[in-house]
Amino acid sequence: MKSDRKPLQIMFLGTGSDAGKSVIAAGFCRILLRRGIKTAPFKAQNMALNSFVTMGGKEMGRAQVMQAAAAGLSPHVDMNPVLLKPYGRNMTQVIVQGEVVTNESAGGYYDMKEQLFPRVLESYGRLLEKYDALILEGAGSASEVNLRKRDIVNMEMALHARSPVVIVADIDRGGVFASLIGTMRLFTRRERKLVIGFIINKFRGDVSLFKSGIVFLEKKTRRPVFGVLPFFTGLHLPEEDSVALQNGRKGSTGGTGTVTVSVVHLPYISNYTDFDPFEVEPGVELRYVKTPSLIRSSDIIILPGTKNTIADLHWLREQGFEEALVNHVKRKKTLIGICGGFQMLGAAVIDPHGVETAQEEAKGLGLLEMRTTLDRQKILSRAAGVCARKGIIDGPCTDVGVEGYEIHMGVSEGAACENPVFRLTRINGGSVDRTDGGSSEDGTIWGTYLHGLFENDRFRRCLLAKHGLVGDRPLDYRAFLDEQYDRLADLIERNVDVNRIIDAARRFGSKL
């Protein structure tokens, strides 16, 4: 779908993964919002550990949720029409415009271009008609020549959109000259015409020492370097993939808190953004742990969501976590399971359709009296309700409201579910009366299918208060995130010639 309208468009592509495209795109969404420009993010295809469910009950990647928030918008699946979720055995769940369409091998997915790209263009066309500016983002490296014929997210999308492109390079990894010049050389002549310049990201030290490098790059590529962003660690924004976990960027930094929350870092961990509020809550220390010895001093242990419950159950046993978790609850410390982590707490996980593995039944941890049966049909919903389980939080619980979202493939049943954690009153905007989760008789062990649970400020504070957190500085998490988007925009505007980029993008259309 094409339109005669000419909204402002800027596309950020990278020389590699984790170059900073998503964050810079979010910053530009906030910059344009502050200038009164109605702006939407767009990424044709995303591969992510962390996903989100919209108010319409559709699934999309967290990066575009973050960018939508920066733009002052509610997220919509048109902002990320294709989402890929790897789940083991070299398989990927393919989600198109918010709904699962198939499970494919990596090779099988790349053969789907003719099926997927028209759907991508439908979503792009709808955004083009609705907004005054689009901030587009690519994926990984923009110059993977072996994938060029199957591309739907990098230069193929830029060419269709006739969008000016800014290349983002990560100088912290080294090789920034080779990566930028090499990227330009690998582009076709038609593709190079779309590139209006570069942003150098994650620079450490005195930027004045890089001036000769800028001159060299501009001479070799005949493109301007719009700015050099410093390496920054003081911003807290939701992540979409495992890079932040693998390189140690997640978790509290420096000192200890009154309350220690340990999240078990499962091999197939997903939706770990659930725990971001703990990372910035005053008085809380958040840890991501891979060995049982690190959870002994924890007040709260959480088994997170997972893309493969059965495989991660085996890993827990192999690493010795089973005994450590039993000892934890014997000390009357809290153990929480979220989604797949909740399923692990039961007696068994049954997989009759081979959703995750060829193993039809796996023994659970046996800490909750329930069994989970996996199903082919994924449950996606936005949910709201109230806490229904006395004793899991400090003070009366019945008036503590919660909101969150469900993303799971399975149903849990048994005595533990007769002690539900939440009573849900709304699903996808409609009224309901149903329960969620399950708990032990004493409330020490409990689990839920709700993601985003700890973003509910009152519930989170009541949970932490039960474990000894005191103080008069409660965190308003949504206000905190909004402040982070403004800080990000300020950082970009201080170090990047934003006006030059916008002016170049506005002039770009007239040249094509």
Image (cartoon, helix red, strand yellow):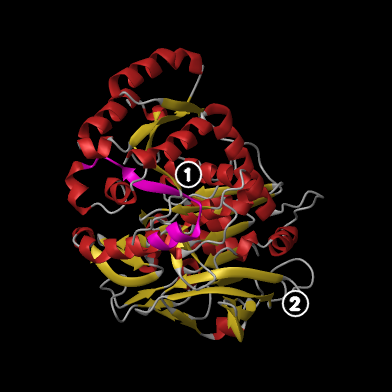
Nearer to us: label 2 or label 1: 1
Magenta span contains residue 220: no
Tell whether 46 sits left or right of 414. left
Q: Residues within 10 Å of mark 2 (few under 14, many from 20)?
A: some
Q: Name the foreground residue: 467 vs 230.
A: 230
Q: Residue beneath label 1, please?
A: 25
Percent position (x, y) of residue 362?
A: 36, 74
Q: Is residue 155 visible?
A: yes
Q: Residue beneath label 2, please?
A: 398
How many callouts does the rendering have? 2
Percent position (x, y) of residue 222?
A: 31, 23
Magenta part of the chain: 125-144
Point 58% across, 28% down: residue: 494
Point 49% across, 23% down: residue: 204
Q: Name the foreground residue: 434 vs 73.
A: 73
The quarter of the rendered structure image containing the C terminus is: top left
Reading the chain from its start, which is encountered first: label 2 or label 1? 1
Tell whether 191 sits left or right of 227. left
Q: Is residue 171 above or below residue 294?
A: above
Magenta span contains residue 140: yes
Residue type, numbered disc 2: Thr
